[in-house]
Structures are given as C-alpha cells and as structure tokens.
C-alpha cells in the first residue's frame, strides 16, 4: 500500500472507569492543528465496555469522527486485549498519524502496538508539527526531551505508517467545547484471540484522590530540599489552603521519603502548567524545570541567588522560605478577607 | 528458574551540563552508570534468586565499554553476562534495538525477562514492550512488586492514579521502577571475582536469531531529524530584599495577575 493511502489523524481516547482522560481532550486539540495542516480529519478511537455514550463528548471536544469499540473484553485496560483491538482498527482504517497520551496506559500500549504493526513510535513528545520536507511533501515531526531534559530531539518516521507518538499530558491545549457539534460516530467490532490473554486483572486500588490531580491544580505551592521535612511542608500546605491550591514537590523530597511520588513535578513526575507555580526551596534541576516551566506565572523563593530556578521564574525572591511563606500566608489571608 | 535481565549503560544525565556558549551537551567527564531502572530490575531478579533459586543472566547491547557495567552486575550477583556488540547494531531506534535483544533472548532458556521501565538517556520506555511483542510474550510495565506463583507470576503495577494487581500465566516480560527495588551494593569479593574469574561473553549479530536487514539503522523506522539544547525562557526579576518587602512584592504581583 502506498503511504499516501494512509490518511487522517487518529487519537487514542484514553478512558479509565468510563471517564475520558484529560490528555485525550488535549490530543484532540493538537490533532485539529495537525489535521488542518494536512487537510485531513480528526478521528477518535474510543475503546471500553459500555462507553458508546461518550462518543458525542469527543465530537464536542474536536473529533470529526469517533470509532467506538465497545466490548466487555475492553472493560479494564489490559495490554493484549487493547493491542488486538487497536491493531485491527489500524489494519482496517490505515491512519496517517496515531496519537496516545504518554500515560502508564499509552506508554504500555503504543510500543506494543507499534511493534505489532511494524511502524515507528516516538515517546513522550512535547511538540508536534506538520512541515514540508526537502521535497516539499508535508511530513510529521515529533519533538521530545532526551538526556533527562537537557536536549530536545525532533524525530521523523519517513517511510513507515502509521506515524505514532505518545504525548506528554498537560502540554497540549484542549479546545473549547462546542456543545451540539455534529460528527460521525461508527462502531468497529474486532475479533479477539482469547488464547493470547495471559494477564488477568485481580484488583485495582485507587490512590488518595487528592494526590492524583496536582496536574489539574490552578495553584501549586511546591517544595524542594530547602523545605527540609514534613514540618516544612506544613507551612506550604497552610499557604496552599489559604489560596485554594495544592502542594507539590521536587524529586529530592520524594527520594527523601518526605512526599509521595504522586506529588512529584518533573521529568520522572508530572508535568504541570498551573496559573501559579510557587517554587519554595527548589534549586531547579533541569529535570524539575521540564515539568513546570510552562506554568503561567512562576514565583521562586530560594536562599541561593544562583539557583537555576531563578532562570525560569517570573518573580524571584532570594530569601528564607521558612520565614517568608508563613508571613505570606497571613498577608494573603488578610487580603482575601477584604 | 532462569531469569534474564536487560540492562543498559547510560551517561549519568544528572551530571550533564550545557555549554553556555555553544549550547551543546558537555559529555566529557560524565560518568557512565548502569541505568537506574535496569539496576532495580537486576535487584528484583536477585531477590527472586534468593527466595526461589534462579540463574540470573544479564544481557546488554552496546559498545565494548559496557563491559564495566556487566562486571558490576556479576559483582552484584548475576550468574552470566552477555554483551551484544557489533557495528551492525549501530544507529538502532527502539524497534531495531528490541529486535536485536529479542533475537538474543530467543537463543537462551528463560522463564522470566525483566527490564527497567526506561533508560535515563532516551527516556522512551519502548524497548521492553517492543521486545515482548517480538517474543510474543505478555508484558506488565511499571512493576513495583513481583512474586513467582505455581504457573506464572503475581505482579503489582503502579499507575498515575492506582496500584493494580495482575496475575500472569507463564513466561512474561516485566518492566520495573527503580524506586521499588533499592539495589544492593557490590561486595568486595564480588568485584574481585567479577574481574578475576568471570567472563563477559561478547556476541556479534551472527550469534543471535535475527534477519540482518532488520538491525541497526536499516531496521529503524524512526530517525533523529535534529537535536538541539532546550531553550529556556527569559528570566524574570530577582529581588534580594527583606522578608516584609518580599511578601509585598509577591502579593502585588499576584494581584496584578488576578491570581488573588
């Protein structure tokens, strides 16, 4: 088959327990930009059990078409079940591009699938573009951080199709919902080979709910080594409480056992882009900056005036967070009571 | 039980600096280490060996310098070390890398394959799932605990929002998180033994079960188009003032930005 016969930008619309994940909306947003450049359509792939009623939601968030694969085998994410369904959709629909969220699901599924359909995959992208190649043909470019965020690499997949990428959550912008938007909703029925189902889900224990959504917080008061300990984090929590925000952490305090990994911002933690990111006692290793530098407004408080965090801060304060944070908490409390 | 652990030698990316003038990576003097997640994988294998008895074979693909890392694995307690080293592997992306590793593993006896979640230089997390597909084996990634059962393994997997328990029937590929398996240190006797009495087997492409056309650059669907240092945004204002003034500055800015 010719490469030109592979068409349209497909999005794996990740859902968990029937809830469409934010990253799926972000991918639909980006897919709209890419599809417009190519003059092609955005198609969402919705896999699950009893999820057909979510298709309209995807249309309103930017899908021109939704392919629904509604099967009991797909109730919970399991690698083989999802790979079988997705590889059959790919064989049937011939997508030009397939995007996945770089979540624990997307990063488990996409490589398995890429190897099964023998195509190229780019991991954990932060930028996707369509640009002309040297012959003037439009090609797909995926850019991602490597070497712990020290280097950016733009990767192409010139000859094999589909071109697949996983995309870091929290980086792409979702579109504003268009209520009542019309789209084509189709269903697809895969044939499962159950003899290959060797993994069984025994149980799922959900984490503390609060911990799971630092990436959704509008205000993050984030602490690093300078916070010292759990007592120090209480000062940050008090400020977060007053401002209606959440506390997050650098890797140092997670490695030290002070904070749980679910609160970690950075290359090996979460990517966040809140309205306000207040970095307290965080020196700003490049791996940390990778996870927060897209925040709307960054305040940094650090004793070391040469700390790299100041290179990304909109407002930097050289000082002792242990004094400043409690004073700021009282001051903002008064301000909000006005 | 035969356990194979895939390990990679990587530059310690926490030690990498950017040349402020040329804007390029300074790799000189950056130490090479065993990739942390892979070391966690080796630790899991060694714990299983202690509990149930097992033969642990470490496999790596890389240049001859990776010998040092493989001897570290032997000194930690691995029984056998294989280095896939051949110019024909050069330029491989994750698909071609996973193909070569799978081609090597096909020639070995195994009950379990363990790999790290991801390497700190590439950070793709793709090689192990792709290898599992080449070998037609089930996979579980982001593993934080694994125990042998009568006919397979019981495994705990860490997601963003949950921890799942999964039961695997038969052989499988697990990718593990370093944070869940704090790796042991080498013993002095282990180090002496690794250098005095042990062998790191170096295998070329001829020794493994592969189609040469699918190796290295030729077998790689993805190519690096360009790489460049990350551009940081323009720094804002930095103030060295009293605590009282600092608080006022922050409050004024937050009001200006309509955050409070």
Image (spheres, rainbow, N blue to C red):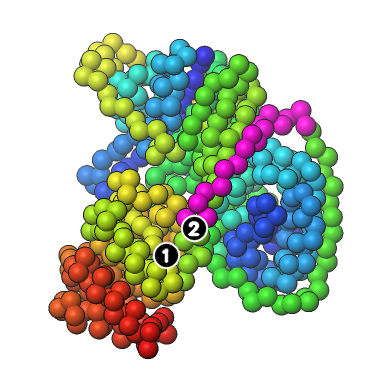
**In the shown orientation, is residue B177 left or right of residue A50?**
left
Q: Is disc 2 surrounded by few (<14), some (14 to 19) or many (20+) residues within 10 Å? A: few
Disc 1 designates what residue?
A246
Asked if residue A313 is positioned above or below residue B84 in the image, the reply reads below
Q: Is residue A172 visible?
A: yes
**In the shown orientation, is residue B255 left or right of residue A318?**
right
Q: Is disc 1 surrounded by few (<14), some (14 to 19) or many (20+) residues within 10 Å? A: many
Q: Which of B86 and A69 is in front in this view?
A: A69
| Contact flag, marks 1 and 2 (Cβ < 8 Å) | yes
Residue B199 place in picture, x, y as percent: 34, 15
Magenta-highlighted residues: A194-211
Quarter occupied by residue B112: top right
Q: Residue at x 59, y 61 (%)?
A: A23
Q: How many marks?
A: 2
Q: Which of A155 and A327 is in front in this view?
A: A327
Determine if the magenta segment contains residue B224: no
Query: What label sits on residue A210 in the rendered view?
Result: 2
Q: Which of A317 and B111 is in front in this view?
A: A317
- State which quarter of the image contains the C terminus of chain B: bottom left
């Amino acid at each position: 088959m010719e490469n030109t016969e592979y068409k349209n930008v497909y999005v794996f619309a990740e859902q968990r327990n029937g809830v469409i994940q934010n990253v799926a909306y972000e991918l639909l947003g980006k897919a709209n930009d890419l599809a417009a450049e190519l003059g092609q359509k955005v198609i969402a792939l919705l896999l699950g059990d009893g999820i057909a009623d979510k298709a309209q939601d995807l249309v309103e968030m930017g899908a021109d078409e939704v392919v629904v694969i509604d099967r009991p085998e797909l109730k919970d994410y399991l690698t083989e079940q999802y790979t079988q369904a997705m590889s059959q959709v790919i064989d049937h629909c011939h997508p030009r591009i397939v995007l996945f969220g770089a979540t624990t699901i997307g990063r488990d599924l996409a490589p398995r699938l890429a190897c099964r359909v023998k195509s190229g995959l780019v991991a954990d992208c932060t930028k996707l573009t369509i640009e002309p190649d040297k012959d003037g043909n439009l090609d797909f470019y995926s850019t991602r951080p490597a070497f712990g965020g020290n280097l950016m690499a733009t990767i192409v997949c010139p000859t094999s199709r589909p071109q697949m990428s996983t995309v870091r959550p929290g980086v792409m912008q979702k579109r504003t919902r268009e209520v009542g938007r019309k789209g084509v909703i189709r269903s697809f029925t895969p044939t499962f080979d159950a003899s290959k189902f060797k993994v069984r889900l025994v149980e799922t224990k959900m984490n503390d709910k609060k911990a799971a959504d630092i990436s959704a917080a509008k205000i993050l008061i984030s602490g690093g080594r300078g916070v010292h300990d759990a007592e120090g984090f209480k000062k940050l929590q008090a400020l977060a409480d007053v401002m209606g925000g959440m506390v997050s952490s650098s890797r140092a305090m997670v490695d030290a056992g002070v904070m749980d990994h679910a609160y970690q911002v950075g290359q090996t933690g979460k990517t966040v882009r809140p309205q306000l990111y207040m970095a307290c006692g965080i020196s700003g290793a490049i791996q940390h900056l990778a996870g927060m530098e897209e925040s709307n407004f960054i305040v940094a408080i650090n004793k070391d005036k040469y700390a790299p965090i100041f290179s990304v801060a909109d407002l930097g304060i050289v000082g002792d967070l242990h004094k400043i944070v409690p004073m700021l908490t009282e001051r903002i409390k008064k301000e909000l009571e006005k | 039980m035969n356990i194979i652990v895939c390990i990679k030698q990587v530059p310690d990316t926490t030690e990498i600096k950017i040349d402020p003038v040329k804007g390029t990576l300074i790799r000189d003097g950056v130490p090479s280490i065993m990739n942390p997640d892979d070391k966690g994988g080796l630790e899991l294998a060694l714990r299983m060996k202690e509990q149930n008895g097992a033969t642990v074979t470490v496999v790596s693909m890389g240049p001859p310098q990776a010998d040092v890392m493989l001897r570290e694995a032997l000194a930690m307690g691995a029984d056998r070390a294989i280095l896939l080293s051949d110019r024909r592997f050069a330029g491989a992306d994750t698909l071609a890398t996973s193909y070569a590793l799978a081609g090597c593993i096909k020639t070995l006896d195994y009950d379990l394959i363990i790999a790290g979640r991801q390497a700190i230089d590439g950070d793709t997390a793709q090689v192990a799932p792709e290898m599992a597909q080449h070998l037609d084996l089930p996979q579980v990634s982001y593993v934080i605990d694994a125990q042998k059962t009568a006919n397979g393994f019981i495994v705990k997997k860490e997601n963003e929002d949950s921890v799942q328990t999964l039961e695997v029937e038969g052989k499988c590929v697990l990718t593990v998180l370093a944070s869940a398996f704090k790796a042991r240190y080498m013993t002095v006797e282990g180090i002496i033994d690794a250098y005095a009495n042990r062998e790191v087997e170096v295998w070329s492409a001829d020794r493994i079960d592969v189609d040469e056309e699918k190796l290295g650059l030729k077998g790689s669907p993805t190519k690096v188009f360009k790489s460049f240092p990350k551009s940081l945004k323009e720094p804002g204002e930095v103030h060295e003032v009293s605590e009282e003034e600092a608080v006022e500055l922050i409050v004024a800015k937050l009001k200006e930005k309509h955050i409070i």
